[in-house]
Image: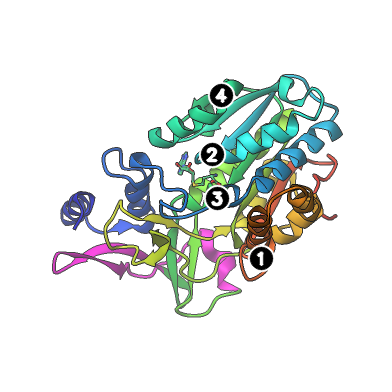
Amino acid sequence: MTPLGQRLAARITENGPLTIADFMAACLLDPLDGYYTTRDPLGTAGDFTTAPEINQMFGELLGLALAQSWLDQGTPGNFVLAELGPGRGTLMADALRATSRVPGFNAAANLHLVEISAALRARQAEILSPHNPQWHDSIDTLPDGPLFLIANEFFDALPIRQFQRDGAGWAERVVGLSDGELMIGLTPATPFAALDHRLEDTNDGDIVETCAPAQTIAAEIAARITGQGGTALIIDYGDWRSLGDTLQAVQGHAPKDPLADPGKADLTAHVDFEALAIAANDAGAAHSRLTPQGVFLERLGISARAEALSNGAGKDQRAAITAAFHRLTHPSEMGTLFKALAITQQGAPLPAGFAP
Ligand code: SAH
């Protein structure tokens, strides 16, 4: 077992089983051995690749979509340009290069990055320092002002809890010990008010997931936008409503048992976009339709951008652009599994890429 695994086993022996959320939080964020706190996991040499790392088109189009919203909202001066979980900073660097063509946008933007990982903050500083970013541990410390925000593959890293339907109650899936090894167990079933609405669409044995931090963060974003204007673009894998065990571990671009080697693999879960939308509504904001990434990027003009990049490119480069276009948009790749949701003020113009 990894050193973190041994410490978690000791914790379980002392205090009883961990919720999946406690387990996930420890694996990802433990100050000594957490997956994100200790490394840069991105890229071909790392454990997984994200959309902005596939091709510059992704960040460019998202940046321009945000800038269009900024224009539609009357070009507010001195606004907060924020990214949650910026990874290597690639998305924001591509976005700001594209938006430098939008008069006034970059000059009015104050760049704020919410990032927990020291290793990734260093990567972000390498390419974003010309834009004078400020870093935050959480969104609570973002300054006031109109908020134009991007979060790509951030919400999927937030700790989830899992509940298994048992009659009219729910048993929580927890991480315990069996013969000294970590293993999944179930608590006794009890009624759970927060899941009453799921009694209608589940059967005995079904697993549903909740993500309290995601709801809190969505509510905070929505409250800021309701009060001060702005737009949030949230892109992630998941669906309108969670059903089933979606906890997933990935190491070296291959799936892994989530309980094996705590702290050494990336752990994510599907994002329940309905929960984010409800949190946004409750905070007084409006949200867009949940839109498949392929459709979203197509509406933002990815075909035209791919064509423009291909013009004048060599044969190998053209093939790489075509492959990236396919990977980002095709239903068999990221086009359908990944989805986009926007949060705006009630009555604000719909951001580019979304249909009424
Ligand atoms: N958005 C980037 C990186 C996605 S990986 C991209 O698309 O390439 C997830 C990112 O979220 C990493 O930067 C990770 O360090 C950060 N992260 C994960 N959990 C976090 C938390 N609780 N608070 C702040 N940042 C977090």
Mark 2 falls on what kind of element?
A: loop
Residue at the extreme front = 314
Q: Position of residue 342 (x, y in %)?
A: 72, 47
> Alpha carbon of mark 2 to alpha carbon of mark 1: how far?
22 Å
Look at mark 2 in the image and give the residue it sits on: 86
Q: Earlier in the sequence, mark 3 or mark 2?
A: 2
Question: What number of labels is visible?
Answer: 4
Measured in 3D between alpha carbons, the distance from the residue under mark 4 to the one under mark 1, in whole angstroms, is 32 Å
User: Who is closer to the viewer here, 155 or 185?
Assistant: 155
Residue at (66, 65) in percent of width and height? 336
The vertical placement of 107 against 173, above or below, is above
Locate residue 109, reporting x and y percent. Answer: 69, 24
Residue 29 location, quadrant: top left
Residue where numbered disc 4 is placed: 133
250 relative to 274 in the view: left or right = left
Please tell me whether residue 292 is drawn above or below residue 154 in the rendered image.
below
Q: Is any atom of residue 353 visible in this view?
A: no
Percent of width and height locating residue 231:
73, 38
Q: Amino acid at mark 1?
A: Thr
Image quadrant where residue 349 sits: top right
User: Residue beneath label 1, please?
Assistant: 336
Secondary structure beneath disc 3? Answer: loop
Q: Which residue is mark 3?
A: 153
Inter-mark Cα distance, 3 to 2: 9 Å
Residue 216, x across and y down, in percent: 54, 43
User: What's under tag 4, amino acid-wise?
Assistant: Pro
Find out whether the residues at labels 4 and 1 contact each other: C-beta distance under 8 Å.
no
Q: Earlier in the sequence, mark 4 or mark 2?
A: 2
**How far apart, in angstroms, are the residues tagged by discs 3 and 1?**
15 Å
Sort mark 4 into few (<14), some (14-19) or many (20+) by Cα contacts within 10 Å: some
Q: Which residues are magenta?
A: 171-200
Contact check, label 4 and label 2, Cβ < 8 Å: no
